[in-house]
Structure formats: structure tokens, C-alpha cells
Image: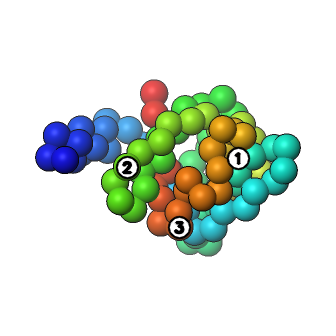
Amino acid sequence: MAGQNSELTTFMTDNKFLFKVEQTFLITGRGVILLPGLGDKVKHIRTGEKIKLIRPDKTTLETIITGITFEGKHDICVGKDISKDDIPIGTEVWLTD
């Protein structure tokens, strides 16, 4: 577990934090929508960009952004390969290179 923590620390210093998930919704046929808290300032993002999801228990998932609402400044949609149950409230969303 110590090795995983140092890998996460290195990852977090080299990449961009987007937001912490406050709510999730499943849209059948489209995927899971991740919503940040109202005060979170999400940077401009684009579909196709890679993200890493760091769950509260420090396990991670990698996926890509498949859709965006509010002109790339708010909610994002991730692919159908990830379920709503995979992304608990409090999951951190990080943009990767």
C-alpha cells in the first residue's frame, strides 16, 4: 500500500485537479455524469481527454471524457464502461496528459 501512496503523490503533483464529485447520474445509453460541487471552478476540458478518478479509498480508475455540459465548464460524462457504483461521492477527478 505504501508504494501505491507514493505513486498517487507523484501523480497528483504532475497532473491537474479538476474537481471532487458531489453527485453522479446514469444516463442509459450514454454513461455516467459526474457533477462537481457548486463552488468548484472546473477548467476548460474537452471530450476525448484522459482523466483519472481517485476514489475516497485511494483506489483509481482511468477513463476518458465522452461528453461535457455547460460549455466545458461543469458536468462531464464518462464512458459506458464505468458504472455509477464505481464512482462514490468524494471521488477526485484529475486530468492526465
Q: Earlier in the sequence, mark 1 or mark 3?
A: 1
For discs 1 and 3, the disc positioned in front in the rendered view: 3
SS category of the residue bearing label 3: loop
Label 2: state its secondary structure. loop
Res. 67 visible in picture: yes
Does residue 86 appear left or right of residue 5 in this picture? right
* Residue 20 visible to an observer of this rendering: no
- Residue 29: x %, y % from top left: 85, 43
Q: Could you tell me the amino acid type at mark 2?
A: Thr
- x, y percentage for residue 84? 65, 56
What percent of the width, then of the height, locates residue 83?
65, 50
Q: Is residue 1 above or below residue 38?
A: above
Distance Cα–Cα, label 3 vs label 2: 14 Å
Q: Which of marks 3 and 2 is nearer the N terminus?
A: 2
Q: Are marks 2 and 1 in contact (CB under 8 Å)?
A: no
Q: Residue 77 carries which label?
A: 1
In the image, what residue type sits under mark 1? Cys
Residue 89 marker: 3
Q: Name the residue under label 2.
A: 59
Q: Callout 2 environment at 10 Å: few (<14), some (14 to 19), or many (20+)?
A: few
Secondary structure under the numbered disc 1 in the rendered image: strand
Q: Name above or below for residue 63 compared with residue 94.
A: above
Q: Is residue 8 found left or right of 92 in the rendered image? A: left
